[in-house]
């Protein structure tokens, strides 16, 4: 399981253009649950951009919405990611985003 998660995270965080924003979303959700609008405000990102990243993370089983798809329902890290968060942290530490630092 951890090998599959490692590959998935390398692809979603390090291997694609939106990886830095996805990493920021994961870190924010680890601190507390947010809905899309709250994440948009907290991270200074466009709402549609946040929704795109949330949809991608949810489709890949990294985040969840226990209350379903109700408007404004919060997102949480999935038990799958929460249980292996050290893998995410390892990948996150190895990345150098454009400009040399994370937001």
Image (cartoon, grey):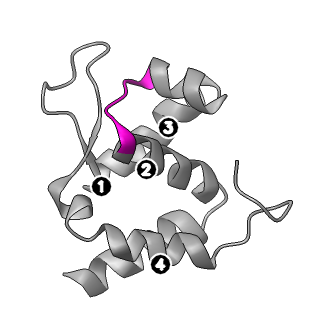
Asked if residue 103 lies in the magenta stretch, the reply is no
Q: How far, Cα to Cα, is label 3 from label 4?
A: 24 Å
* Segment colored magenta: 31-36
Q: Which residue is mark 2?
A: 26
Where in the figure is residue 18, as x and y percent of width and height?
62, 53
Q: Which residue is mark 3?
A: 52
Q: How far, Cα to Cα, is label 2 from label 4?
A: 14 Å
Q: Is residue 81 above or below residue 26?
A: below
In the figure, is residue 33 to the left or right of 7?
Answer: left
Mark 1 near mark 4, Cβ–Cβ under 8 Å? no
Q: Which dot, 1 or 3, sits closer to the camera? A: 1
The quadrant in which residue 71 appears is top left
The dot on residue 62 is 1
Q: Which residue is mark 4?
A: 90
For the question of whether residue 47 can be seen, the reply is: no
The quadrant of the picture occupied by the N terminus is bottom left
The dot on residue 6 is none
Q: Secondary structure at mark 2?
A: helix
> Mark 1 or mark 2, which has the lower sequence index?
2
Q: Which dot, 1 or 4, sits closer to the camera? A: 4
Q: How far, Cα to Cα, is label 1 from label 3?
A: 14 Å
> Mark 2 or mark 4, which has the lower sequence index?
2
Q: Which dot, 3 or 4, sits closer to the camera? A: 4
Mark 1 neighbour class, 10 Å CA radius: few under 14, some 14 to 19, many 20 or more: many
Q: Is residue 74 above or below residue 91?
A: above
Mark 1 near mark 2, Cβ–Cβ under 8 Å? yes
Q: Residue at x 59, y 58 (%)?
A: 19
Q: Residue at x 21, y 34 (%)?
A: 65
Q: How far, Cα to Cα, is label 1 from label 2?
A: 9 Å
């Amino acid at each position: 399981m951890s090998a599959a998660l490692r590959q998935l995270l390398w692809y979603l965080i390090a291997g694609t253009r939106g990886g830095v924003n996805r990493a920021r979303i994961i870190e924010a959700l680890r601190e507390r649950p947010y809905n899309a609008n709250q994440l948009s405000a907290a991270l200074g990102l466009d709402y549609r951009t946040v929704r795109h990243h949330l949809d991608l993370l949810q489709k890949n089983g990294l985040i969840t919405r226990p209350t379903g798809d109700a408007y404004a329902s919060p997102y949480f890290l999935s038990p799958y990611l929460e249980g292996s968060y050290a893998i995410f942290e390892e990948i996150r530490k190895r990345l150098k985003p454009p400009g040399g630092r994370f937001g």
